[in-house]
Image: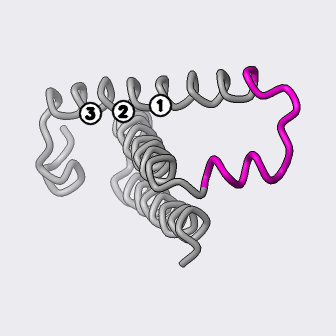
Amino acid sequence: MVTSITSFGRSGLYDWMMQRVTAVVLASYSIFMVAYVLLNPDLDYNTWKGLFEGTAMRIFSLLALLSLVAHSWIGMWSISTDYIKPTGIRFVFQSVCGLLAFIYVVWGVQILWGV
């Protein structure tokens, strides 16, 4: 049995719902990006830069980034609790995943917002 410390008190329903919501956001972002590339066959740096200079696109990209991190965190947490039985190893694995997720979010914010 997994302790509440490892799961941070989440319920399975919350994880299931979050996976579905983040999947919709990621699918929407992917469809938008593919459509944008297909509808702009002569895409160059200035057009691409212009797309990401808009606040709406930055917010959409940030939402996609946060959705990717949340989706992957829930997936990695589920995999680690199912397949990594020793508590210490599981804790280290989850800690590394959490640290990497945090680093990727900070890095993504820096890229998107030029912080």
**Image position, residue 47 (x, y; %):** 76, 46
Seen in the picture, residue 101 relative to 103 is either above or below; the reply is above
Residue range corresponding to the magenta coloring: 38-52
Q: Main secondary structure of the magenta part?
A: helix
Label 1: few (<14), some or many (≥20) within 10 Å? many
Residue occupying the point 46% across, 42% down: 64
> According to the image, label 3 marks what residue?
18
Residue ranking furthest to the bottom:
115
Residue occupying the point 56% across, 62% down: 112
| Three-letter amino acid code at the position of disc 3 | Met
Q: Nearer the viewer, residue 30 or 79?
A: 30
**Image position, residue 1 (x, y; %):** 18, 38
Residue occupying the point 42% across, 51% down: 59
Q: Residue 22 bears which disc, if any?
A: 2
In 3D space, how far apart are the residues under numbered discs 3 and 1 (Cα atoms)? 12 Å
Q: Which is more N-terminal, label 1 or label 3?
A: 3
Task: Classify residue 46 as left or right of residue 13.
Answer: right
Tell us which disc is closer to us: 3 or 1.
1
Asked whether disc 3 touches disc 1, contact meaning CB atoms under 8 Å apart, the reply is no
Picture quadrant where residue 42 is located: top right
* Element on which disc 3 rests: helix
**Image position, residue 6 (x, y; %):** 24, 53
Q: Quick check: is 96 in the magenta stretch?
A: no
Label 2: few (<14), some or many (≥20) within 10 Å? many
Residue occupying the point 40% across, 26% down: 23
| Three-letter amino acid code at the position of disc 1 | Leu
In 3D space, how far apart are the residues under numbered discs 1 and 2 (Cα atoms)? 6 Å
- Image quarter where the C terminus lies is bottom right
Asked whether disc 3 touches disc 2, contact meaning CB atoms under 8 Å apart, the reply is yes
* Element on which disc 1 rests: helix
In 3D space, how far apart are the residues under numbered discs 3 and 2 (Cα atoms)? 6 Å
> According to the image, label 1 marks what residue?
26
